Image (cartoon, rainbow, N blue to C red):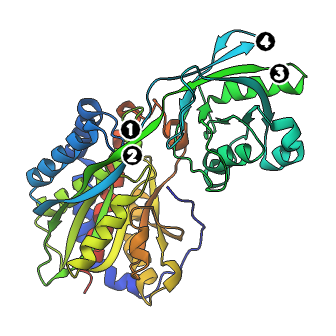
Amino acid sequence: MRPWIVLMAAIPAFAVTADQYRGAANKLIDAAMADNGGLNRLEYLCYRIGNRLSGSQSLERAIAWSADEMKNAGLANVRTIPVKVPHWVRGRESAEMLEPLAKPLFMLGLGNSVATPPEGITADVVAVSTFDELAKLGRSAVQGKIVLYDAPFVNYDQTVEYRMEGASRAAHLGAVAALVRSVTPRSLRDPHTGMMRYAAADRKIPTAAVSVEDAMWIHRLTRDGQRVRVRLKMEAHFEPDADSADVMGEIVGREKPNEVVVIGGHIDSWDVGQGAHDDGSGAIAALEAAALIRKLGLQPRRTIRVVFWTNEENGGRGGVAYRAWANAHGTKHVAAIEMDGGAEKPIGFDLDFGKRGEQPGVRERAVAIGQLLKRINAGKIQSGESEADVEPLLADGVPAFGLRTVMAHYFDYHHSEADTFDKIVPADFRQCVAAYAVMTYALADWP
């Protein structure tokens, strides 16, 4: 998910035009709030298929199942778009404190990390809260050590830098491994994984996330002058790129079938939990929105295309492959919508025009449509950054929408074993489907 900046637009005369969709919007909201089909699909994905990291057999089972579900929902032109994806394998892993106590640590290796030697890496720990603190320590204090970043959660975009860049910054000063406090505001000793990246100029060292509690404990010990010694073992490695696919189905437009509103979420997840909020809920909400539009007999002027993108979590190749396929087939996108911030209570949509700038009338139209969602308090339109899978379309000038929720607990579960179906609140999920359906249908049918 991406952060957003509040920038409300005034409600213009477009609202009068949007009123022509009030009847359809109310029918879609009523249908979504009474619907169990989306929840049943999401439960199956989570409980029967489980987590879905790129390169895994479970992801490929999910892709085959998704194509079948799009057909069962009555979508047309269901197909898979082949994508080669990275295949990172976690393998066995562990971390344990050796001094001053002998105790296992709660850890998860970070995606793209390299392995330790088979016997592991055993070293003293130096703990910091910021990159500035690390730089002030210098090579003499870091050489041969394991660096622990105990960075409290401020917001995702700011705090995730320690996960993404921490290993290379530590390696630059001679560290042998890096540990990162899990990127979450709340914790029950559950580590949170996620992607990291290595700087080309620095040596690759193994890196893992540890629980918030373990990070705070180790940091306090080192601040008190206590020597802390840790052994880290990881078998993480890359295998050759694997075959995967985006999944696509459509409601074909009645007047302008080659003009497309594309909606969806990513079907892959990390290899922990069940990928319920991230992003099974986003993918299934998009499918259910289209299914309800079709069930109510609403065929818009333009085509609604549902896409389940692959490999969002550790590569983003699904979004790039979809854009290439769509351009090769002459698709004219009029809007792109992705939900990748969990299925909590929706508040509205953010809107991104990319570097090509705002297009006349689009924001006003979105604000007008948002008024149709006031009934469920989900019509706020705000400026922000697009989600990762639709970001490639910004280069073509496609307005990108992101369905936004209150996100009160999203980062409690994010990339952890706790991202499971039981965390989905049915009423919230149904409202996400309703918001998705109303915005999608109105954008696709606008005269």
Type of the residue with mark 3: Leu
Q: Residue visible at 27% across and 57% down?
A: 83
Mark 1 element type: loop
Mark 4 element type: loop
Q: Residue visible at 33% across and 59% down?
A: 318
**Residue under numbered circle 3:** 221
Q: Nearer the viewer, mark 2 or mark 3?
A: 3
| Proximity of marks 1 and 2: CB atoms separated by less than 8 Å | yes
Q: Residues within 10 Å of mark 1 (few under 14, many from 20)?
A: some
The CA span between labels 1 and 4 is 41 Å
Drawn side of residue 224 relative to residue 180, left or right: right
Labelled disc at residue 248? none
Q: Using the rendered image of the protein, determine whether residue 21 is visible from the camera's viewpoint.
A: no
Q: Between disc 2 and disc 3, whose residue precedes?
A: 3
Q: Residues within 10 Å of mark 3 (few under 14, many from 20)?
A: some
Q: Between disc 3 and disc 1, whose residue precedes?
A: 3
The picture places residue 376, in percent across and down from the top left corner, at 39, 57
Mark 3 element type: helix
Between 147 and 418, the residue placed more toward the observer is 147
The CA span between labels 2 and 4 is 46 Å
| Proximity of marks 3 and 4: CB atoms separated by less than 8 Å | yes
The picture places residue 257, in percent across and down from the top left corner, at 15, 80
Q: Residues within 10 Å of mark 4 (few under 14, many from 20)?
A: few
**Residue under numbered circle 2:** 428
The picture places residue 260, in percent across and down from the top left corner, at 24, 76
**Residue under numbered circle 4:** 100
Q: Residue visible at 67% across and 48% down?
A: 168
